[in-house]
Amino acid sequence: MRKILVSAELILAFTCLMLYSGTPLDPFLTDGFTVKEGDRTIFRLLYTITYIVSLSLIALRWKKATYVFSKDKSTWALIGVCALSSFWSSDPDTTVRRVIALLGTSIFGLYLASRYTLKEQLKLCACMLGISAVMCFLFAILLPHYGMNDSSWRGIYPTKNVLGKTFVLGAAIFFFLAMTTKENRWVSWLGYLTSGVLVLLSKSTTSVGNLIIITAAFLIYYRILNLKYQVMIPILTFLSTIGIAFYAWFISEADTILGSVGKDTTLTGRSELWPVVLQMIAKKPWLGYGYKAFWTEGNSEYSIVLQAVQWDVPNAHNGFLDLWLALGILGILVFIIGFVINFLRAIYLIRWNGKSENVWLLVYFTFTILSNLTETSLLEQNNLEWVLYVSAVLSSKLSTRANL
């Protein structure tokens, strides 16, 4: 009986992860990702079910969940600022609804950290993403109306960029498991290669670059941070110099490089969007417009952005700008303080005990920064990346009793 209950719980957790990541049902329910109001009702219902499931599972082991909850205050402080922003929000009703969704999403991350070890969480995610990868191939080959967008793949996801970003994350998970787990290592390498293929097929230039950086970052965190200071510091200095030089070269040659792959330096409208967004930020720099309140039809500043860029922009296409828009400098500071403390703590713990949980936190933080440079997933409700952010931070705190 106990095995049946454990299996049932595993299936529930797997299903929730799939919903947060993107399911094969999404293209059918939205007629090829053309979202209508009725579709939103269906998705709200599905996500609400995940919140109820998360709370129910936490209630079964509330003492452990309470202990895990207490291990990190920065994440909950940030969510608290989101909730407080309803008092100054330009659209309080939207802010309250989205904060409830964000809290529900975060509770699922709390559940994962309190129920499973980090490697168990990542194996569960790897299994889910492996099935998603198979679905992407099937949709692109058998149902190209849903799985293709011109010559690029989007699989079961709304756009090629979402496909690319999802499997950059998938590649990071599979690579981490391949490097830190002995059993069935070949499966992890196969998952890593498959993720890389899907990133290439998405034709998302940003995702291809992020995949290379994430792979290199893992090797740096996993190998170099354990070296003696006399060796580590010169190597990190050299790599940083090479990275800065490469970035400077890329910027100076951006027109030629991006033109050779059919891109331009406007980054598909982002360089036109970001200056306008900064102008809107300057109007309310300290507290922002309220969590998720800016990008609503009733907001006059949003109308100004639409008129300026002349395309239907859903967000700032930069997670940090969206955070600034929503919560102002207050939210930025709360996020940065928690992020930097956890980042430095992970480096300290890698050198102190070398546990892989701390390596994953650094890898995932790097992924978070990269994925939010041209897209928005930071502090996003109903989103796998925020679930894993919460679970990564909490899991790293449980890996050792050491404090920084």
Image: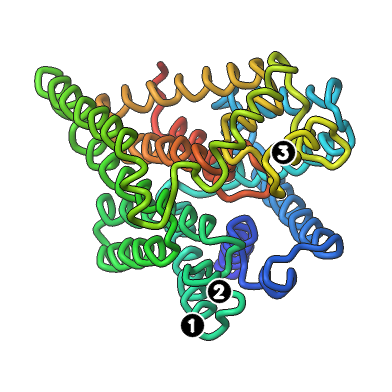
Q: Which residue is at the front of the view, 248 or 359?
A: 248
Whole-angstrom CA distance, mark 3 to mark 2, is 32 Å
Sequence-first tag of 3 and 2? 3
Whole-angstrom CA distance, mark 3 to mark 1, is 38 Å
Q: Which residue is at the front of the view, 85 or 272?
A: 272
Residue 5 seen in the current view: no
Residue 176 coordinates in the image, percent (x, y): 32, 50
Q: Residue furthest left?
A: 231
- The amino acid type of the residue labelled 3 equals Leu
What is the number of the mark on residue 119? none
Q: Residue at x 36, y 43 (%)?
A: 255
Can you tell which of label 3 and label 2 is closer to the viewer? 2
Crowding near the residue tagged with mark 3, few <14, some 14–19, many ≥20 C-alpha atoms within 10 Å: some
What is the number of the mark on residue 147? 2
Up-down: is 217 above or below 198? above
Asked if the residues shown at circle 3 and circle 2 are in contact, with their CB atoms under 8 angstroms apart, the answer is: no
Up-down: is 181 above or below 71? below
Residue 113 coordinates in the image, percent (x, y): 53, 43
Q: Residue at x 27, y 28 (%)?
A: 244
- The amino acid type of the residue labelled 1 equals Ile
Sequence-first tag of 1 and 2? 1
- The amino acid type of the residue labelled 2 equals Gly
What is the number of the mark on residue 141? 1
Up-down: is 276 above or below 122? above
Whole-angstrom CA distance, mark 1 to mark 2, is 8 Å
Side (left or right) of 99 relative to 131: right
What is the number of the mark on residue 103? 3
Element assignment for label 2: helix
Crowding near the residue tagged with mark 1, few <14, some 14–19, many ≥20 C-alpha atoms within 10 Å: some
Q: How many marks?
A: 3
